[in-house]
Image (cartoon, coloured by chain):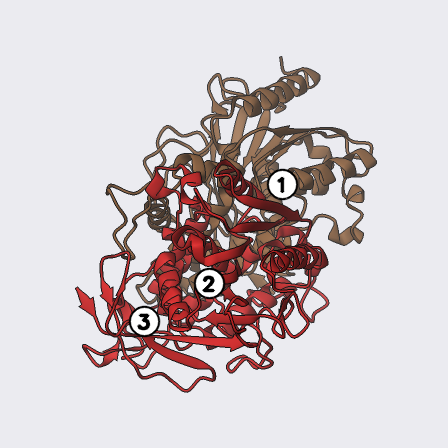
Chain colours: A red, B brown
Amino acid sequence: MSISAPLSRRALPGHQIVLGETDKLRLDSGVDFGPFTLAYQTYGALNANKSNAVLVCHALTGDQYVADDVHPITGKEGWWRAIVGPGKIIDTEKYFVICTNVIGGCLGSTGPKETNPETGKPWGLDFPVITIADMVRAQAMLIDHMGIDTLFAVIGGSMGGMQVLEWCKSFPDRVFAAAPIATSYRHSAQNIAFHEVGRQAVMADPDWCGGNYLLEGKKPARGLAVARMTAHITYLSEPVLHRKFGRKLQNRGAITYSFDHDFQVESYLRHQGKSFVDRFDANSYLYITRAMDYFDLSVEFDGRLAEAFRGSNTRFCIISFSSDWCFTTAESRRLAHALNAASCNVSCVEIESDKGHDAFLLDEPDFHMVLSGFIQGAAEARGLN
Amino acid sequence: MSISAPLSRRALPGHQIVLGETDKLRLDSGVDFGPFTLAYQTYGALNANKSNAVLVCHALTGDQYVADDVHPITGKEGWWRAIVGPGKIIDTEKYFVICTNVIGGCLGSTGPKETNPETGKPWGLDFPVITIADMVRAQAMLIDHMGIDTLFAVIGGSMGGMQVLEWCKSFPDRVFAAAPIATSYRHSAQNIAFHEVGRQAVMADPDWCGGNYLLEGKKPARGLAVARMTAHITYLSEPVLHRKFGRKLQNRGAITYSFDHDFQVESYLRHQGKSFVDRFDANSYLYITRAMDYFDLSVEFDGRLAEAFRGSNTRFCIISFSSDWCFTTAESRRLAHALNAASCNVSCVEIESDKGHDAFLLDEPDFHMVLSGFIQGAAEARGLN
């Protein structure tokens, strides 16, 4: 089976490249996919010997606008400006930073909301199910196109960290330094369960129309909002919810004995659900959560995770956050043990924080210090200073 | 405002009593409610001096059939047969056990699915918002009717534990021994957040019909299933999900690259959602979750929880489970500290278990040993041996 992907895209700022025109992308599902579009941003300049490229991988609901001043849809600044930019840890005056919208995404890369050239209609559920490895192979085709042999660093948090690990496993000679952050080598049963709830919420919305909502001129806004609300709770922590909201009431002196949003935390969650629907495609949410669920680097080695990294020369810095119950430090330790068992160069740091999984996106000085030290040390070893 | 409640009920086994015909039930919301029906079960016999009564309080989705051989709807045995029955910890050959369906419930007590006598239609969202204290006051009216001054024991887990604590605060002289299990004196921000997601899932289902689904001949089955699935994850724990399901596939040798239930945990969750819808009313789910959200015993004392129990002669046994992240041991400890500060008779035990919040319903030998010891000690002190 070979599928040709659409070339037309809505007008979004940044780069778009058509890949897989001759050599298609062989998906894990067996589908030969292409041509397909990859939307991406770059920041800084590639040096003469092409040794200063940093690939940043985004999380489930992230995108390629990692370090932009103004996001084209939300109007806010890029999602990792705390880390990436001029003078930042990933210094765009020193490094050439690349960030792609994953395939299956909804910000310009080929995904279920784009047009299926075979039918002239949006892909919907005819879009092939993709995996983290598929996302990474698509990125590798872009890196090939750029003529970059070895990436100085690949970094990312959450699903971005899964891509980092997949890069290290699939292309060990092409990654000099890797920072998988707030992530795991496999999606846990609990995380699969929460994703399944989110998908069921989307699919239960009649406006999802069996995946054909774009054709029907509808939008499963309520279902997607519920999915986002559930997920959002998992990205936080009980301590941070208690600290930020506790049982504080929303603009009222007393409870109303109604189903109104009496509590601030309810109001906050409803806002999170609503604003997400404005910027994300429901089918992309299904496909990308599925890709995360399927992720398990150890499975092809019958659970012997170390085999995934045997012989790797990449230097790893694994970072977790103490209150992250989505991707726990225990998972990061298992990864570190496997890398040690494979005689890899690895450090593993747990950052003390009450901010839960989302801590990797936030202003966390200890985290930034650790990442900064790792990047600087790697740059010296790479002769980039 | 005074509301009269319906008297007709579907045919369910067990007792039903009409209360509040002359003296209405004053709800926390200010509504004078009644007459209303309380459905309840009893097991064993009340002794001559009426000193052997044990009130068991059920959790969010529980009911009065605590120790029946066969539940009239599910066909399974009563939900706490591990604890309550002949020769069990709460020995029905020794104690007179009472368990009521809470008001707002859907198993015979007056709740949103019953007929509003003022309109002749199901209450729906015209049902008044109720609180844990309202549930407890309704139970107290039944206990009055039975001529019981002091309950030998009040026990319950989760929302049942909230009722236990409310009993001890509102009727300190009427509770000899109290066992609040896997519970808290207030609902946390995270728990409110998960409940809000569940309510939004129900309300997002077009078949909810603004709460009037019974009138419309519909049922918000998909929304309620999503709500239940989310809640069900919170009742378990990551370790137990890992142990029971891990990443095991459901009746297949490999992933299907689809949105089918590839993983056992997905299949299990879908089943949980579906079977719940068959036995529970969606509006009851909204009302009872709201009652839990509103629960905070400390609020009328400006946070000084100890004041809620000052002067109490009740003996308390607080039990929590190590992997319960819904109602954590930390919350139980705060409760124990407050009881100590109020010079109460209190013991506080954390049971080691990987089964999460639901452990209180399961076969947990250490838990049973602790509860058994507490009940036996209290029985001796009460002269019941």
Which residue has dot 1 on it?
B328
The CA distance from mark 2 to mark 3 is 15 Å
Q: Image check: B354 left or right of A219?
A: right
The CA distance from mark 1 to mark 3 is 41 Å
Q: Quick check: A280 above or below A189?
A: below
Which residue has dot 2 on it?
A60
Q: Of discs 1 and 2, which sits in the foreground?
A: 2
Q: Which chain carries label 2?
A: A
Residue B226, position as x, y percentages in the image: 40, 56
Residue A130, position as x, y percentages in the image: 32, 61
The amino acid on which the numbered mark 2 sits, given as a three-letter code, is Leu
The residue depicted at 44 percent of the width and 65 percent of the height is B203
Q: Which of A134 and B209 is in front in this view?
A: A134
The residue depicted at 60 percent of the width and 77 percent of the height is A77
Q: Which of B51 and B64 is in front in this view?
A: B64
Quadrant of the frame with the N terminus of chain A: bottom left
Q: Which of B280 and A268 is in front in this view?
A: A268
Q: Of discs 1 and 3, which sits in the foreground?
A: 3
The residue depicted at 40 percent of the width and 59 percent of the height is A289
Does residue B11 appear in the picture of this structure?
A: yes
Within the image, what quadrant is residue A29 found in?
Answer: bottom left
The residue depicted at 23 percent of the width and 72 percent of the height is A22
Residue A212, position as x, y percentages in the image: 27, 73
Q: Which of B21 and B239 is in front in this view?
A: B239
Quadrant of the frame with the C terminus of chain A: bottom right
SS of the residue at dot 3? loop
Which residue has dot 3 on it?
A112
Outermost residue toward the bottom? A11
The CA distance from mark 1 to mark 2 is 29 Å
SS of the residue at dot 1? loop
Q: Which chain carries label 1?
A: B
Mark 3: give few (<14), some (14-19) or many (20+) Cα within 10 Å: many
